[in-house]
Each structure stands twice: as C-alpha cells, then as structure tokens.
Image (cartoon, grey):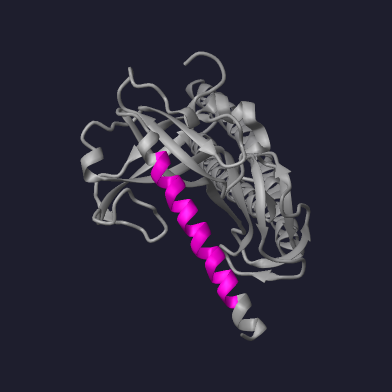
Amino acid sequence: MKAPVKITIIVASLLVIAGGAFAWHRHQLAESVPDGILYGNGRLEFTLVDVAVKYPGRVTKLMVHEGDTVAANQVLAQEDAATVQSQYDQAAAQQSRARSAADRATAELAAHQASLRLAQDELRHAQIMRRQNLVSDMEVTQRRTQFESAQAAVRAATQGVQEALHANEGAAAQVRQIQTVLDDMTIRAPVAGRIEYRIVEPGSVLAPGGRVYSMLDPVDPYMTLFFPTAAMSTLKVGDEARIKFDGVASPVLATVSFIDSQAQFTPKYVETATEREQLVYRVKLRVTPEEQQHLGALLKAGMTGEGYIRQNPDAAWPQAAQRSGAE
C-alpha cells in the first residue's frame, strides 16, 4: 500500500475516533444533567458597536489599534478639518460683524430716544408759551411735527435693533453648527469597550457613515442557546443560569435575559438532544454585572461552553455547573 493512502486511512480513522468520543462525551453529559435543569451549548457574544464618521472626509490620524481597551468619549481618530475650519472662521467673522451692527443699532436707538425727549420738552414748553400768548400757533405746530418725527425715528431705530439682534443670533447659531461639525470630525468612542477591528488606515477617504472601527461592548456579554418547544413551558426571563466555559475552572453566574417569542428552524451549528427536533426557541443567558466586574478581561468573544438553566429552585446543579463551596 502506498504511503499517501496509508496516511489518509490513519487520518480518517483518527477523525472517526475523535468524533465518536465527542458524541459519547455529549451523550454522557446530557444524561448527567438532573431534572429541573436545562442544558445547551454555545459561544460567548458581545454587543458589537460600529464607530463611524458622521461627515465625509479624509482620515488623518488613528490613535488606537486592534485589541486596545478604550474609555467612553476617548479620541479614536481624526478627520481632515481644514475646510470646515475655514467655514468656521468665516462664520465667526460674520458673527463679529453682526454683533457690531447690533451695537451700532443700539447706539442709534439711544440717540433717537434722546432726540425724542428733547422734542417732547420743546413741545411742552411751546404749548405753555402759547397759552401765555408768547408764541404763535405756527411755533406749536412746528414743535409737534418735530416731536412726531422723533417718535417715528425711535420706532424705526427699535426695529433696526431687533433686526440686528436677530442677525447676530443667526450668526451665532451658524458658528455653533459649524463648531458641532468640527467636534464630530474628531472621532470618539461611544462607549467604553475593546477595539475588535481597525477597518481603515490613515489617508482613507470615507463617505458619511463610513466605519472606522468595530468595537465590543464588554459590559454586555451573553450566550445564545436553542431549546425545543417541550422545554419552553416553564422557562421564563430571570431564571437563574450558569455558564461553564471551556478552559475556565469555575462556572460563571448568569440569568435568562431573553426568550424568543417565535420558533425557528434549528441552526446547523447547534447540537440538539435529538435529530427529530426541527423547531427551537432562541434563549439568551446574560452574565451578571457582578461576574462581569469580577472577571474583567477574562471573558472574550467566541469563548465556547455549556449553559445551564435552573427551572426548579430545588434542583441541584450538575457537577460541571457547581461552584466552589456549598451549593
């Protein structure tokens, strides 16, 4: 027999033996789970957060790398803001002109108000003198005309002040809007987490919504399990659960956080108790906040393991799900 054929036969035999051993292990594990405990296997998942640009532009700087842990609002990247900075400078200059126009209009209003007070005093004085027959009716008419003209000038100046103030407010709003654009061109972490992928490199030109990083939210780890219809009758959100990760000695505390309201066909990667089960329900086990804080960076996306749910409070945890100390 040729050597390649022998190698092929040996490899195939090893795979058959390994598959049989794995199936036997799963069978023994399923039989060792006591009544009142649901059992399934899955992978640890985290909520995925995309860090994207809001405005188009060229990425000039990337401050973090894959695997880095970042804090909320930490600067992650920078877009080229030269054009927007020019727009900001122009808007700021326009605001300065609008502020000066408002100040000038206010000063003109004060001058017209002073003229109005003078015209009012002169009219009053002329009316007194007319009653004493010291001036003619024509003098009183002229003083009244001057007073009415001063009133009209004050009304016009008041409108001018309002228009100047509105123009100043519009210019200030334009400055604030462009300042917001400038701030958004500095890309910050939306939440604290861990960078999973760096999608672009410096110099890349992105459209609005273009992704820069993909990061994981470490405060929301969960495992998805699938159970047949028969197991769903007593299962409820909040049930106590435990997850035994491969390679981790002690099981992790968790709770049932989600139960799908609709059944679905069994995913191909899920190992069910029997091949006859075609419809299953998706269930999420969420690691408790206390465990998240205790384990820190130990939990990583993709970790495999078994999930156990205790439906009966009196049911004893199986050996694999028991923690150190009395249960």
Pick whichever, 39 or 164, lies toward us. Answer: 39
Q: Is residue 163 above or below residue 3?
A: above
List x then y, in percent, for residue 250.
58, 29
List x then y, in percent, for residue 38.
34, 35
Which residue is drawn at the image coordinates 31% and 56% (left, top)? 266
How many badges with numbers are in the image?
0
Q: Is residue 155 above or below residue 82?
A: above
Residue that sits furthest to the top in the current view: 326
Q: Is residue 87 above or below residue 108?
A: below
Name which quarter of the figure residue 84 lies in: bottom right
Pick whichever, 217 or 103, lies toward us. Answer: 217
Pick whichever, 178 or 197, lies toward us. Answer: 197
Which residue is drawn at the image coordinates 43% and 52% (left, top)? 23
Q: Main secondary structure of the magenta part?
A: helix
Which residue is drawn at the image coordinates 53% and 30% (left, top)? 252
- Specify the quadrant that holds the N terminus: bottom right
Which residue is drawn at the image coordinates 60% and 34% (left, top)? 113
List x then y, in percent, for residue 146.
55, 40
Q: Specify the segment rendered in magenta.
A: 8-29
Q: Is 81 on the left or on the right of 170, as rendered? A: right
Name which quarter of the figure residue 224 lies in: top left
Residue 116 visible to the viewer = yes
Q: Please say whether residue 300 is one of the residues in the magenta stretch.
A: no
Q: Please say whether residue 17 is one of the residues in the magenta stretch.
A: yes
List x then y, in percent, for residue 81.
74, 61
Pick whichever, 46 or 318, lies toward us. Answer: 318
Residue 111 visible to the viewer = no
Residue that sits furthest to the bottom in the current view: 2
Residue that sits furthest to the front in the current view: 1
